[in-house]
Amino acid sequence: MAFRKHRAGEIVIEQTRDLSCVRAILERGGMITDGIEWPPACYLIAFDGVDAVGVVGVEPMLDAALIRSLYVNESHRKRGLGAQLVTAARKAAHTRGARTLYLFACPERAGFFQRLGFVETEKKRLIGALGGTPEAEYHQKRPRELATERAFVLDISQDGIIDRS
């Protein structure tokens, strides 16, 4: 799949259907790739010039969506790229009808997501809202791994609404 050309040093985030590129980035980061082929899922890749340097996925289900597979290359961390990818995922989820956005995170990453407005929630709430998505199914089948994760939620129902008061 051909990508648009970008200038080196210019960070651009684009939606992609090139799952081989998504898989390569995730494997490079040691992240799970199970279920990335799920048809309703959406993936966004961050490019620095022609180099893919980050990725995030969105798994929508009715009026909720799950952020999965957020990864930024080590060389591009601490520059706000993770937050940019989450913002792009938030927009992608909202345009797909989601009013609530969820994610799983390891305890070390909890602070990052809390700074972006996510609040901790019960894992059973996340799984109840998003059972059937590959990421939720992955964790349900691995209770020992699920025990090490934390669940987060963000209300995105007001995204895009202009307050004229």
Image (cartoon, rainbow, N blue to C red):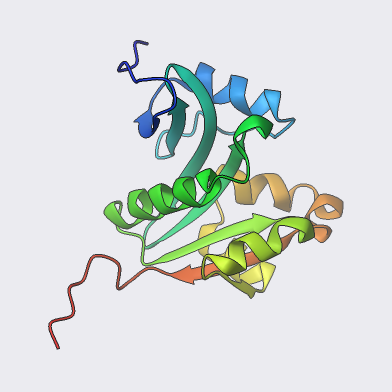
Residue 12 figure quarter: top left
Q: Looking at the picture, how far across and down is residue 112, in whole percent?
A: 63, 60
Placement of 38 over or under 135, stated as above or below:
above
Indicate whether 11 appears above or below 158. above
From this viewpoint, is residue 63 visible? yes
Rendered residue at 39%/29% (across/down): 10
- Which residue lies most toward the front here? 9
In the rendered image, residue 41, in percent from the top left (x then y), is placed at 44, 39
**Identity of the residue drawn at 64% across and 73% down:** 120
Viewer-proximal residue, 152 or 12? Answer: 12
Point out the residue furthest to the right here: 144
- In the rendered image, the quadrant that contains the C terminus is bottom left
How many numbered marks appear? 0
Looking at the picture, how far across and down is residue 161, in whole percent?
A: 21, 71
For residue 156, what is the image quadrant?
bottom left
At 82% from the left and 54% from the top, the residue drawn is 143
**Camera-side residue of 160 and 97:** 160
